[in-house]
Image (tube, rainbow, N blue to C red):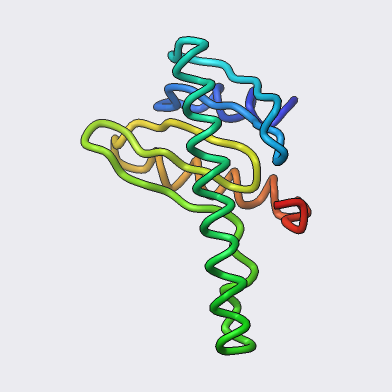
Amino acid sequence: MSIVADLMSRPGVLAAGEYAFRGDRFSYRGALSEEHARMASIMCRATTMGVVMEGRMADNAKPGSRLARTRGWAVRCPEYTVCVVANVFCFASNAPGVVDGVLALMRKTLADTDMELV
């Protein structure tokens, strides 16, 4: 089973998808239109690139800060949270326990993803 299928099987997950680090491909499942999924993949890729770059800059300024190993990010909106780890995004309900479970699954499943591609 793929990470996207695993995420979609969890209660409270609205949509999930993957994007190529180079930005030319994406796939998704869930309650997003094709256009919204495309925009989400672009937003997630750009934000991930920025977060990883800032982590590397912080590590250059203060070696050993561990920020260079940034794996992802999350942003909470009024009704849902966008969770991104490596090149996988997930829109999850803000219901109690949903986001914690989603992030735990994503971090465990994607722990070995090579972030040097970013």
Q: Nearer the viewer, residue 64 or 14?
A: 64
From this view, report whether residue 27 is shown above or below residue 104: above
> Compared with residue 71, is residue 30 higher up or lower down, i.e. above or below?
above
Quarter of the figure that contains the N terminus: top right
Residue 80 placement (x, y as % from top left): 31, 33
Please give the name of the residue rendered at 59% of the width and 44% of the height, measured from the top-left corner: 105
Residue 11 x %, y %: 44, 25
- What is the residue that sits farthest to the left in this orientation? 78
Residue 62 drawn at (x, y percent): 56, 89
Name the residue at the top extreme. 33
Residue 91 versus residue 15 in the image, above or below: below
Left or right side of 31 for 79: left
Q: Residue at x 52, y 11 (%)?
A: 34
> Which residue is depicted at the point 54% across and 26% down?
16
Number of numbered markers: 0
x and y percent of residue 35 in the render? 48, 13
Pick the residue in front: 118 or 6. 118
Q: Is residue 73 above or below residue 95?
A: below
The residue located at (69%, 47%) in the rendering is 110
Nearer to us in this view, 60 or 27: 60
